[in-house]
Image (cartoon, rainbow, N blue to C red):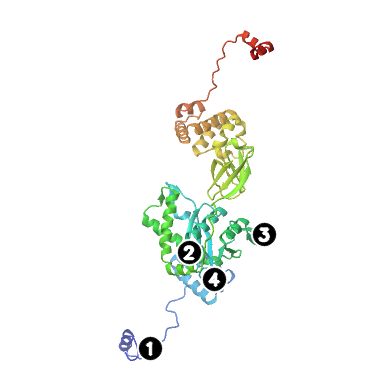
């Protein structure tokens, strides 16, 4: 007790009958034979030549070189041997330097895929990303679901975060995503004008990470993983991943975020005290593009092609570009809404826009650039293929286009059901047969009845008769 020794230690020495100084030192010899000793020099040289080699791959190579000598149960021993060698003689590992965070200095925004959470909307998988904004000092975090890494999504996500706080830090940091930056001829990247306009509106100083240096956005990269793990746990507690609408999913997500942010209270108060209040109105969640509708009843927006109703051909329309959709306006009136497609060079062709004119010009179907869009489902595609195998080119195309027009008029699901029944019965999807089963009517020319004409009535059109009528 006077020496400050623990009772268990003192008891062990009393039982051994030896003083601590007389206790045997740690052994420096092996108690078992090193089974890898003969082949280790070769393995070591391979690790020196290719430091990226994993222990498991190297062990499988060793087994292939010496069949029957090394069993699968030796893998863990070999992995420990490699791990020890790397620590003693391997290449230097990268050092990450912890950084001091200052309250109210900056906010960071990044996109992360959330499809792995397997969220469904009415049973349909909701493929989406999260636009996540974090305050590195307090780790306050907000996330907005979006469809792609676009400027519209970035604008909405950043504003959702800062308008919820009611204030902004001094600067805002992103990585080198195409939403915020574009590539220069020098290979470096600079900010897009739309992003700079957003920063000016919110009085934020824009800054970005170096190309390929994700660690400079380390705070948000780390919180992205923690956020998705937390969402996964809340989904397990909820007992279902299905939501009745996108709005219901957003409301649930906001509740989870509020709970997570509640633990940041003290540091968040300190951070809010160092930030500037927002003194501006919220920008719209869309950008505006003015385009002219081409002769194909299509328009190009953000390098992608969309069709619109043919009555708009030749008209200059105003398009509101949201993250997930386009709204087409003519003279201030909404004309059409189209789902936004991702990437560049993609297209969204609504078969309902063009089917009326394809029926009048059936020969255009075969080489139509967007022909794949004329098959709403696989049932329609199979019906066309069977028609094409059994009828002439013109007859197959005409029958199918009339069936597709019928789907527009009486309902896609009703016609799809009929096509499925005909396929099961081994019948061709001829238009007359589909009409009779779907309950639609084949359009016919109206009958015009022309009565007998009395030629004497034309006498009233002579100049003399007209003058008499005027008098």
Residue at x 45%, y 55% (from the top left corner):
117
Residue 5 visible in the snapshot: yes
Cα–Cα span, label 1 and label 3 = 70 Å
Quadrant where the image shows the C terminus: top right
Disc 3 or disc 4, which is closer to the eye? 3
Disc 1 or disc 2, which is closer to the eye? 2
Cα–Cα span, label 4 and label 2 = 39 Å
Give the percent coordinates (x, y) of residue 234: 39, 58
Q: On screen, 378 above or below 26?
A: above
The reply to whether discs 3 and 2 touch (Cβ–Cβ < 8 Å) is no
Residue picked out by circle 3: 184
Residue picked out by circle 4: 43
Kindly state the secondary structure of the residue where label 1 is placed: loop
Cα–Cα span, label 3 and label 2 = 31 Å
Residue picked out by circle 1: 23
Kindly state the secondary structure of the residue where label 2 is placed: helix
Cα–Cα span, label 1 and label 2 = 50 Å
Residue picked out by circle 2: 223
Q: Quadrant of residue 294?
A: top right
The reply to whether discs 1 and 2 touch (Cβ–Cβ < 8 Å) is no
Give the percent coordinates (x, y) of residue 389: 55, 32
């Amino acid at each position: 007790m006077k020496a400050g020794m623990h009772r268990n230690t003192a008891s062990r020495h009393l039982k051994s009958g030896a003083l601590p100084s007389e206790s045997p030192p740690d052994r420096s010899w092996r108690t078992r034979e090193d089974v890898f000793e003969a082949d280790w020099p070769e393995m070591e040289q391979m690790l020196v030549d290719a430091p990226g080699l994993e222990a498991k791959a190297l062990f499988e190579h060793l087994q292939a070189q010496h069949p029957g000598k090394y069993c699968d149960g030796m893998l863990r021993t070999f992995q420990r041997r490699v791990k020890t060698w790397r620590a003693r003689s391997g290449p230097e590992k990268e050092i990450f330097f912890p950084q001091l965070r200052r309250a109210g200095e900056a906010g960071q925004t990044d996109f992360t895929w959330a499809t792995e959470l397997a969220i469904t909307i009415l049973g349909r998988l909701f493929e989406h990303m999260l636009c996540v904004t974090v305050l590195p000092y307090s780790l306050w975090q907000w996330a907005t679901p979006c469809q792609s890494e676009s400027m519209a999504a970035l604008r909405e996500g950043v504003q959702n975060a800062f308008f919820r706080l009611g204030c902004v830090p001094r600067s805002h940091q992103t990585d080198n995503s195409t939403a915020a930056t574009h590539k220069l001829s020098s290979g470096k990247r600079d900010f897009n004008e739309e992003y700079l306009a957003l920063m000016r509106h919110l009085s934020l100083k824009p800054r970005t990470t170096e190309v390929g240096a994700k660690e400079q956005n380390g705070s948000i990269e780390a919180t992205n993983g923690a956020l998705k793990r937390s969402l996964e746990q809340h989904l397990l507690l909820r007992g279902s991943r299905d939501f009745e609408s996108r709005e219901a999913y957003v409301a649930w997500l906001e509740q989870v975020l509020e709970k997570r942010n509640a633990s940041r209270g003290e540091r968040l108060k300190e951070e809010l005290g160092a930030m500037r209040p927002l003194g501006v109105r919220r920008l719209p969640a869309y950008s505006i593009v003015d385009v002219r509708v081409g002769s194909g009843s299509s328009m190009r927006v953000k390098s992608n092609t969309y069709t619109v109703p043919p009555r708009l051909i030749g008209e200059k329309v105003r398009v509101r570009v949201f993250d997930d959709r386009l709204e087409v306006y003519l003279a201030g009136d909404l004309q059409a809404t189209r789902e936004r497609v991702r990437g560049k060079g993609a297209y969204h062709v609504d078969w309902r826009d063009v089917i009326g004119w394809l029926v009048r010009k059936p020969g255009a179907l075969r080489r139509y650039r967007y022909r794949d869009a004329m098959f709403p489902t696989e049932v329609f595609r199979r019906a066309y293929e069977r028609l094409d195998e059994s009828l002439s080119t013109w007859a197959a195309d005409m029958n199918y286009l009339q069936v597709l027009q019928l789907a527009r008029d009486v309902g896609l699901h009703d016609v799809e059901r009929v096509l499925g029944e005909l396929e099961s019965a081994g019948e061709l999807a001829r238009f007359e047969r589909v009409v009779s089963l779907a309950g639609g009517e084949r359009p016919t020319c109206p009958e015009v009845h022309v009565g007998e004409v009395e030629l004497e009535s034309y006498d009233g059109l002579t100049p003399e008769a007209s003058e008499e009528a005027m008098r």
